[in-house]
Amino acid sequence: MVVDAGWPLTTALLETRSAEAFVHDERSVVVTRVSVPAVRQTERVLAAVGDEALVAAVGPARWPRAVEASCGPRLAELRSRHRVVRVPIDRRLEITGLTGDRLPKSVAAAGRSLAALLVPAVAPQPRHRRRAEPSRTGPAEEPE
């Protein structure tokens, strides 16, 4: 589930149609901007979504000091655990939105980073060779 931290929390709850579907979901991605008001709202949203949320922070790689100082305990913890992924701003996407064109490399890389955190890599399973079926070179048997 992806939650835009810019929504009021009550709107986000209504949009999911059920508070139970929203609260404590282990696969939540909270999308926020790197600004003081957005970080404050994000802290409130993180309190509702549970412990294993990820944050997609849209903006600069280096957060301004005022934004860092506005981080509450939940967001600060997620940052220290590397569960906040920077999503760079792309002016073309801001204007056109998503189209059939390829995503800019930096935005696609952020998406891959989020996906890797959402679905941790599973140890590769050994590949088994498929056994060839025995050849039937003899005459076909008639049913009895």
Image (cartoon, rainbow, N blue to C red):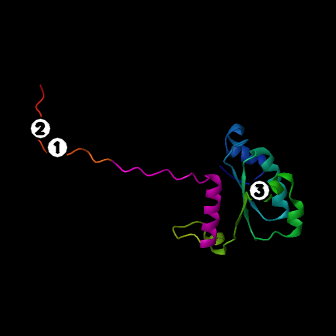
Query: Quick one: SS at disc 3?
Result: loop
Magenta run includes residue 116: yes
Label 1 sits on residue: 136
Horizontal relation, residue 95 to residue 10: left or right: left
Q: Look at 53% across and 70% down and name the residue there.
A: 102
N-terminal label among 2 and 3: 3
The C terminus is located in which quarter? top left
**Where residue 132 sits in the image (x, y, percent)?**
28, 48
- Amino acid at pointer 2: Ala
Furthest residue to the top? 144
Label 2 sits on residue: 140
The answer to whether the residue labelled 1 contacts the one labelled 3, judged by CB atoms less than 8 Å apart, is: no
Query: Quick one: SS at disc 2?
Result: loop
Residue 3 vs 109, above or below: the answer is above
C-alpha gap between disc 1 and disc 3: 60 Å
Report crowding for label 1: few under 14, some 14 to 19, many 20 or more residues within 10 A (C-alpha): few
C-alpha gap between disc 2 and disc 1: 8 Å
**Where residue 114 sits in the image (x, y, percent)?**
65, 59
Horizontal relation, residue 108 to residue 51: left or right: left
Q: Look at 64% across and 53% down and name the residue there.
A: 118
**Where residue 68 sits in the image (x, y, percent)?**
86, 64
Residue 133 vs 115, above or below: the answer is above
Magenta run includes residue 64: no
Q: Which residue is nearer to you in this view: 11 or 53?
A: 53
Residue 58 vs 40, above or below: the answer is below
Report crowding for label 3: few under 14, some 14 to 19, many 20 or more residues within 10 A (C-alpha): few
**What are the residue bounds of the magenta stretch?**
105-130
Q: Which mark is residue 81?
A: 3
C-alpha gap between disc 2 and disc 3: 65 Å
The answer to whether the residue labelled 2 contacts the one labelled 1, judged by CB atoms less than 8 Å apart, is: yes
